[in-house]
Image (tube, grey):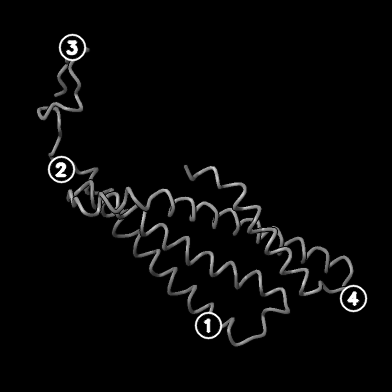
């Protein structure tokens, strides 16, 4: 039961208002995000790593597979960012690990920004690959110059950084 306190008294400093009891929703959140979310992220890292191995067998730099290679790389890093942000916060909240709390507050801005930049870059890469595919379908005899692909990739990365740099302080 929540107590109503006078305006001069802060609930944040009152030890009587802390709720240390474990509720079923906390356990469900812990299982879903830490257990299942981390499992899905680890599986994603493994499958994208296998995809990178298969891309290493072909000459992807001069083909439109460059977009898919970079998409797999970005996806691995997005999954790693997920594993560093969400499970860490919940483990601290549930188990009160002080070292994890301190570390999380030091790296969260950078990891979150990196994740947001990679998500934006992945989206822009998919749009770029689709646009290249569309151009090639209009004129099948014309291919895209591999040097132009690198320019597109650099533009994609710069655009993603410019769009998401506001996440940093």
Q: Position of residue 121 (x, y in %)?
A: 60, 57
**Residues at marks 1 and 2, CA–CA distance in whole angstroms:** 44 Å
Tell me if residue 46 comes above or below residue 15 in the rendering. Answer: below
Q: Is residue 25 left or right of residue 64?
A: left
Q: Are marks 1 and 4 in contact (CB under 8 Å)?
A: no
Q: Which residue is mark 3?
A: 6
Q: Which residue is mark 4?
A: 141
Q: Which residue is mark 1?
A: 53
**Disc 1 on helix, strand or loop?**
helix
Q: Are marks 1 and 2 in contact (CB under 8 Å)?
A: no
Q: Position of residue 56 (x, y in %)?
A: 58, 84
Q: Position of residue 115 (x, y in %)?
A: 48, 55
- Residue plotted at (76% across, 75% down): 146
Q: Decide which of 68, 163 is in the foreground and name it.
A: 163
**Disc 4 on helix, strand or loop?**
loop
- Residue plotted at (90% across, 76% down): 141
Q: Are marks 3 and 1 in contact (CB under 8 Å)?
A: no
Tell me if residue 58 comes above or below residue 96 in the rendering. Answer: below
Q: Residues within 10 Å of mark 1 (few under 14, many from 20)?
A: few
């Amino acid at each position: 039961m929540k107590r109503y306190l006078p305006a001069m008294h802060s609930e944040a400093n009152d030890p009587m208002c802390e709720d240390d009891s474990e509720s079923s929703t906390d356990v469900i959140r812990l299982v879903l995000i830490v257990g299942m979310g981390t499992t899905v992220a680890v599986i994603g890292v493994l499958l994208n790593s296998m995809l990178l191995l298969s891309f290493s067998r072909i000459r992807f730099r001069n083909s439109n597979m460059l977009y898919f290679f970079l998409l797999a790389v970005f996806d691995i890093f997005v999954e790693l960012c997920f594993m560093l942000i969400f499970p860490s916060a919940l483990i601290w909240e549930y188990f009160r690990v002080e070292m994890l709390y301190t570390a999380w507050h030091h790296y969260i801005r950078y990891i979150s920004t990196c994740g947001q930049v990679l998500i934006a870059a992945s989206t822009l890469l998919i749009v770029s690959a689709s646009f290249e595919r569309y151009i090639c379908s209009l004129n099948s005899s014309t291919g895209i110059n591999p040097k132009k692909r690198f320019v597109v990739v650099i533009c994609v990365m710069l655009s993603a950084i410019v769009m998401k740099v506001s996440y940093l302080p």
